[in-house]
């Protein structure tokens, strides 16, 4: 699978897709540089065929329903664009194997040591991307549907991590699995710790224990690696940073916030696929 060339020039053009637990995350690379990124819902096989026929970045945005502004409307010399795919949803992975120019990223392609067979490809890619950007040792906090911690030591060897329900999932679970508790949203600001109504009591219980857990993992990492970097990514990253800036400002000040860590990891692999 060869990269597309932009116009008559020597630019390499790649489309990358990370299929997460609840959304699909897209990015376009030109000359191995991330040009734009956007999120969408899952698609059917019919949409996959339409995406394969896209000739411009603007057309790709319209077909996928991408949010944001592509800024540069690149023209693709031929369709379909080469697609670098990573996925944590096996049913979606199978669906996208029908795309005619796809390369699936697997754990054995990521140059980290000590990876175990069931490690999520999203966690491994984010960790590799963070390490390439800021060096090792590094810990990645991914604030998505699941909240995960994934770290590697100075020898680029997986140190391990943890998985728990993310902010939105914790709030939704109480509503879905109880008889009377409401479904509440995460607030923009920290709720009162000792709440006087049910909505805020749920918010308080979930948010303050979540922040305490993050603090515990962060401090444990810095005990082991005092100079180690910690990056935070994922859809809830900014909300958690906002909470941390109020509750634990000394931790928030040291976190590296980056929404595209997975794509940074994919970018580091493009030259090798």
Image (cartoon, rainbow, N blue to C red):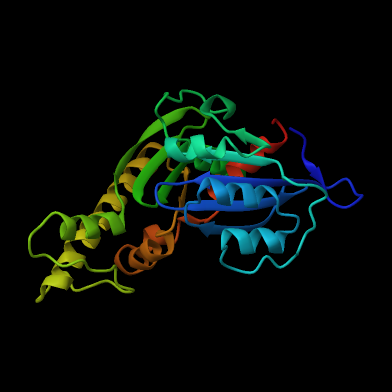
Question: Relative to 245, is 75 above or below?
Answer: above
Nearest the viewer among 91 and 35 is 91
Residue 105 placement (x, y as % from top left) = 57, 33
Q: How many marks?
A: 0
Q: Residue at x 57, y 46 (%)?
A: 17
User: As drawn, which residue projects farthest toward the right?
Assistant: 8
User: As drawn, which residue projects farthest toward the front?
Assistant: 46
Question: Quick check: can you spot residue 46?
Answer: yes
Residue 22 placement (x, y as % from top left) = 40, 51
Q: In the drawing, does residue 9 fall left or right of residue 123?
A: right
User: As drawn, which residue projects farthest toward the bottom?
Assistant: 196
Q: In the drawing, does residue 169 fall left or right of residue 79?
A: left
Q: Quadrant of residue 167?
A: bottom left
Question: Relative to 38, is 216 above or below?
Answer: above
Q: In the drawing, does residue 146 fall left or right of residue 45?
A: left
Question: Quick check: can you spot residue 263?
Answer: no
Nearest the viewer among 49 and 222 is 49
Q: Residue at x 41, y 39 (%)?
A: 150
Residue 52 placement (x, y as % from top left) = 67, 47
Nearest the viewer among 179 and 154 is 179
Q: In the drawing, does residue 154 fall left or right of residue 178?
A: right
Q: Quadrant of residue 202?
A: bottom left
Q: Residue at x 46, y 34 (%)?
A: 152
Residue 158 placement (x, y as % from top left) = 45, 29
Can you say which quadrant of the picture contains the N terminus?
Answer: top right
Can you say which quadrant of the picture contains the C terminus?
Answer: top right
Question: Relative to 46, is 117 above or below?
Answer: above
């Amino acid at each position: 699978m060869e990269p597309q060339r932009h116009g008559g020039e020597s630019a390499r053009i790649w489309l990358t897709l990370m299929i997460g637990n609840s959304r699909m995350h897209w990015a376009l690379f030109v000359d191995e540089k991330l040009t734009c990124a956007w999120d969408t819902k899952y698609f059917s096989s019919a949409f996959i065929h339409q995406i394969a026929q896209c000739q411009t970045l603007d057309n790709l945005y319209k077909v996928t329903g991408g949010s944001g502004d592509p800024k540069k409307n690149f023209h693709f010399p031929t369709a379909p664009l080469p697609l670098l795919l990573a996925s944590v949803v096996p049913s979606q992975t199978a669906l996208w194997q029908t795309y005619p120019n796809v390369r699936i990223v697997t754990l054995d392609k990521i140059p980290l040591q000590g990876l175990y067979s069931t490690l999520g490809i999203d966690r491994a890619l984010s960790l590799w991307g963070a390490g390439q950007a800021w060096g090792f040792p590094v810990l990645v906090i991914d604030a998505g549907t699941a909240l995960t911690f994934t770290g590697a030591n100075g020898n680029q060897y997986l140190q391990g991590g943890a998985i728990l329900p993310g902010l939105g999932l914790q709030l939704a679970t109480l509503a879905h699995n109880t008889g009377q508790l409401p479904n509440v949203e995460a607030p923009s600001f920290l709720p009162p710790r000792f709440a006087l109504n049910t909505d805020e009591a749920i918010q308080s219980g979930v948010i303050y224990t979540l922040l305490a857990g993050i603090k515990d993992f962060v401090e444990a990492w810095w005990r082991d690696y005092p100079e180690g970097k910690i990056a935070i990514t994922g859809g809830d990253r900014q909300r958690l940073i906002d909470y941390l800036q109020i509750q634990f400002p000394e931790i928030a000040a040291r976190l590296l916030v980056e929404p595209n860590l997975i794509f940074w990891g994919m970018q580091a692999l493009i030259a090798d696929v």
